[in-house]
Amino acid sequence: MPQTLAAPAHSELIIKKSRFIGCVQPMADRAAAQAHVDMLWQAHPSAAHICWALLAGGQSAAVDDGEPGGTAGRPMLDVLRHQDLEGVLATVVRYFGGVKLGAGGLVRAYTDCVAQALLTAPKVQLQRMARLQCMVPYALEGLLRREIDAAGAELAQVQHGSLVTLQIHLPQVQAAAFVQRINDYGQGRVGWVQPD
């Protein structure tokens, strides 16, 4: 089951006088990752390279930033994939020490830097969430609210009209049992609709 990170974690390696500063952190999408990399350039203006890899569904990326092709971004992305992570950005800031490492040395340096950071990174399981929306008479609103709390679900939105419309978020694995339980309590007075 895929995981993400609960908080950023850092590492630092010195290899043949080059300094590699690594960070892994939760990141939702490519735009946020690019903004973070831009901030890193402001914080490290004299760095030789800031390589990064993002694993975020269809917005994944691997950036070598001037290092020889395939020696930084792709190996970093492979480390994230090997750990079965999702929604994670790995960055490595490199200060060049004057000694070339060669392609193999660069791959090892960038993967080791990310792997070291991941050793201390707090990981959390990702859960697919279901969005449910139901319409109930006012007499059932209290009961439904209690069931939402008991299930540990989130009441996202409530609208009062001729009926009460409630939008609920809960883990997908619990959705079918929750709907069945509410239908049993409602005795035909609960209507389920597709959320907007």
Image: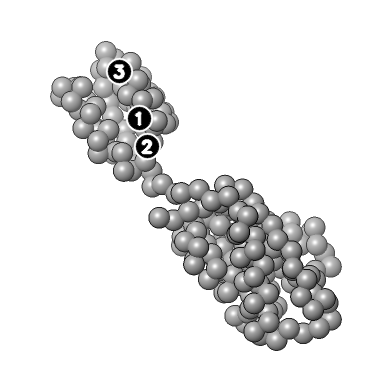
Q: CA distance from mark 1 to mark 3?
A: 12 Å
* Residue 52 image point, x, y percent: 64, 66
Indicate left or right for 98 with 90 as reference: right
> Which residue bears the numbered disc 1?
151
- Type of residue at label 2? Leu
Q: Is residue 56 above or below residue 96?
A: above
Q: Earlier in the sequence, mark 3 or mark 2?
A: 3
Residue extending farthest top: 139
- Of badges 2 and 1, the one in the foreground is 1
Badge 2 density bin: few <14, some 14–19, many ≥20, Cα 10 Å: many
Residue 45 makes an appearance in the image? yes
* Residues at circles 2 and 1 in contact by the CB criterion of under 8 Å: yes
Q: Which of the numbered marks, if any, corresponds to residue 143?
A: 3
Q: Amino acid at mark 3?
A: Leu
Q: How many marks?
A: 3
Q: Residue at x 54, y 51 (%)?
A: 123
Query: Which disc number belongs to residue 170?
Result: 2
Up/down of 119 relative to 173, above or below = below
Q: Quadrant of residue 66?
A: bottom right
Q: How many neighbours does mark 3 have within 10 angstroms: few (below 14), some (14-19), or many (20 or more)?
A: few
Q: Nearer the viewer, mark 1 or mark 3?
A: 1
Image location of residue 105, percent across then percent down: 68, 82
